[in-house]
Amino acid sequence: MAISLSLSSSFPCLRIFSSASASSSLSFSSPPVGLTAPPLVTSSSTRLNPCLCSSSNSGPFSDSPNIRSQMTPMSCLGVSMEEKPRVKSEHKWQRVLLKVSGEALAGDHTENIDPKITMAIAREVASVTRLGIEVAIVVGGGNIFRGASWAGCSGLDRSSADYIGMLATVMNAIFLQATMESIGVPTRVQTAFRMSEVAEPYIRRRAVRHLEKGRVVIFAAGTGNPFFTTDTAAALRCAEINAEVVLKATNVDGVYDADPKRNPNARLLDTLSYHEVTSKDLSVMDMTAITLCQENNIPVVVFNLQKPGNIAKAIMGEKVGTLIGNVTRNELPRELKVKAEL
Ligand code: UDP
């Protein structure tokens, strides 16, 4: 199915792919295909059930060594100002931040967006929200426009170029929202700068409330500031909404110790520390993003979006791709016991 975004018709040269992209060097496996909608999501029924919440329950990950604080400032007083206590989930993660790059959305690159990819994402996200896992998404825009690649062209300054890049992420977000809602997944788009005719402005508390109600929240327009990336936006939003992990969906299986396209002996790494990522200059995420994750002890899982089932596996905490953090996989919370029906 062909899609054309109006920008590409007016500016045919707008469709660009940066060679700096971490995922650009690796090949695709066949994209997940599936245009059949799953049963209507009724995640509100799996949301918080006050009867199941014990006052002694300090959160879903009280037994976890890698837990970022789930507590609000008032929680030390036993009072939560903004978030209900959560049911202890049998899943590894209760709230995740899924980062989908623009490049991943482009699939086989015949168009800016591959609707098979957006539908596959929607279906897999639907399958996990049904289990009560809260999913927020940050979308990139590199399939349409990367500011850094265009800065300097015909007098385009970097800030203006980056604003165009941020607008590109809004296009992707609206497309993804429409796909999600077409299969019954309640979804809200929040933009980092106001575009109130098309989306809500980013309001942290409102975003958290949407998640608690079982809605998927798509954060668009990155951080709202030029000179940043959507990876940094993912780390930032993850920290802000108290999500437990950044799941970085790419077109590669994870992080390798060498470029697998050039070196057939390249090994897929299971785990990495933040320090290894920064010191070895592995092009997983930009430095600002990985540093933000490190400072806030946010684990990052890099995995291949093109493999069917991988998104749901990553969201449910199954072993997939490469884990970046201060912990090994074994130190993470207990393994998943329930699998989603895909
Ligand atoms: N961008 C920005 N500030 C942000 C996030 C994104 O200026 O906080 C711009 C930047 O020009 C970037 C473009 O938006 O190149 C698209 O984002 P990104 O390259 O991160 O997308 P992805 O690589 O994930 O597709």
Image (cartoon, helix red, strand yellow):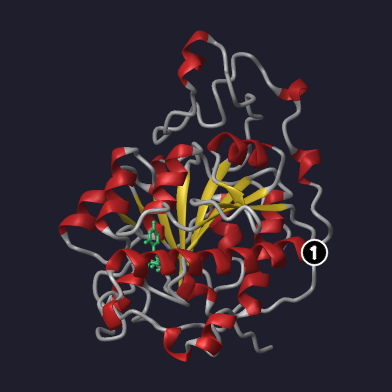
Q: Mark 1 CB in 8 Å range of ligand 1? A: no
Secondary structure category for the residue under label 1:
loop
Name the one closer to the observer, 135 or 158.
158
Instruction: Please give left or right for residue 299 compared with residue 124 in the image.
Output: left
**Amino acid under label 1?**
Pro
Instruction: Please give left or right for residue 331 compared with residue 153 in the image.
Output: right
Q: Which residue is mark 1?
A: 38
Quarter location, residue 174: bottom right
Up-down relation of residue 185 to residue 120 (above or below): above
Up-down relation of residue 295 to residue 329 (above or below): above
Name the one closer to the observer, 23 or 217.
217
Quarter location, residue 185: bottom right
The x and y percentages for residue 139 are 51, 62
Name the one closer to the observer, 197 or 319.
197
Please tell me in which quarter of the rendered image ligand 1 is found. bottom left
Quarter of the picture holding the C terminus: bottom right
Q: Residue furthest front?
A: 155
Instruction: Please give left or right for residue 275 compared with residue 107 in the image.
Output: left
The reply to whether residue 265 is visible in this rendering is: no
The x and y percentages for residue 341 are 73, 59
Name the one closer to the observer, 193 or 182.
193
The x and y percentages for residue 237 are 46, 45
Determine the residue positioned at 43% across, 40% down.
239
Determine the residue positioned at 47% across, 87% down.
11
Instruction: Please give left or right for residue 182 compared with residue 247 in the image.
Output: right
Determine the residue positioned at 72% across, 76% down.
34
The x and y percentages for residue 176 are 63, 66
Residues packed near mark 1 inside 10 Å, few (<14), some (14 to 19) or many (20 plus): some
